[in-house]
Image: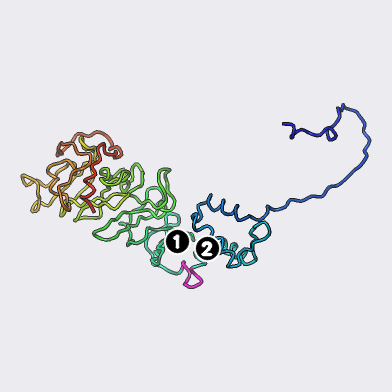
Amino acid sequence: MPWQSIPEEESLPVCERGDVFTVDEVKLLEKHTSPPDYLTEAELITLMEKHGIGTDASIPVHINNICQRNYVTVESGRRLKPTNLGIVLVHGYYKTGMDELMEVSFSPIAATGKPLSRCGKCHRFMKYIQAKPSRLHCSHCDETYSLPQNGAIKLYKELRCPLDEFELVLWSTGSRGKSYPLCPYCYSNPPFRDMKKGMGCSECTHPTCQHSLNSLGIGQCVECENGVLVFDPTSGPKWRMACNKCNVVVHFFENAHKVRVSSESCESCEASLVIVDFNKARSPLPGDETQHTGCAFCDPVFQDLVELKHAAMRHPMHRGGAGRRQGRGRGRRPAPKKPKDKMAALAAYFV
């Protein structure tokens, strides 16, 4: 690459130790760096497309708006030069946090809300701020934790997350909707790589937590490909399981005394077995029995106990077979697998 070579007049001659040279001239050169030039309209459009700001139709509108509002001026070469107003606006965005923004018109966040659950760091009560966006605030640690919106929040039996000691809260949309517990810290700071922000205990992959997907997951959702039907232990006596990805809710074993998820799996569809205890006076089991263990999708004893809208329910992995009262242990239940034969007609069975 000849363009990288040193010109002959600037190259040093061959020198040996002890050689003496005469100094002809000494100069001190003063130079300085300069900031990059202002962006042109074309360069700004390229950056907006790269960062996903606006669409092909709205990007020109955004650029025209900042010009009309005197945030920038168009200089020679179609370069956009920020005005003092535009510079102050940008600095204001960095200096203004959510607390400062809310406190301009409202009382300070630390002085609002009501005590709800304990912080896992200082073990003091955090305040639940119901105003949207609803959140939990620890005034001692001066930290705020996000919560799921459009639902009711309450303390979940004073139970704590095994990872960070935060007290769990229960999010619910009512008796006909979904509900699941969540850890305020894990909800904003996912503890595992396969988790994302905004996930509750029904999507947590903790291997031993009694509220996690591994403990309460029953089977693959019949509508979405990635969802798992998770048992809701707070739904009694109108027991239900709900998909942790979509809005599918399955009601089953109404008025049962107790329902819990077994560590065993169905041999036919690989869904987790459920253990159901009924009151003796209202038991639908044959022979006046009060307890039965089986698959909610394959067991003929359970088929009439699952609430459906229009037709009898069949699990997408159903291939016949029946439940059993006491199955053989096969170790820890594996993660629910995807159905081998997806039946599209099942989508009409749920709401």
> In the depicted view, which residue is nearer to us: 3 or 335?
3
Residue 236 place in picture, x, y as percent: 21, 55
Residue 192 place in picture, x, y as percent: 42, 44
Total numbered circles: 2
Residue 6 place in picture, x, y as percent: 79, 34
Residue 125 vs 18, above or below: the answer is below
Q: Which residues are magenta?
A: 102-110
Residue 61 vs 18, above or below: the answer is below
- The residue that label 1 is drawn on is 138
Secondary-structure class at tag 2: loop
Q: Is 136 one of the magenta-colored residues?
A: no
Residue 302 vs 131, above or below: the answer is above
Q: Is 105 one of the magenta-colored residues?
A: yes
**Image position of 273 (left or right of 84):** left
> In the depicted view, which residue is nearer to us: 126 or 239?
239
- The residue that label 2 is drawn on is 97
Residue at 29% x, 56% y: name it.
Answer: 179
> In the depicted view, which residue is nearer to us: 24 or 147?
24
Can you tell which quarter of the image residue 86 is in? bottom right
Local crowd at mark 2 within 10 Å, few (<14), some, or many (≥20)?
Answer: few
Task: Name the kind of residue labelled 2 in the image.
Answer: Gly
Task: Name the kind of residue labelled 1 in the image.
Answer: Cys
Residue at 40% x, 55% y: name it.
Answer: 184
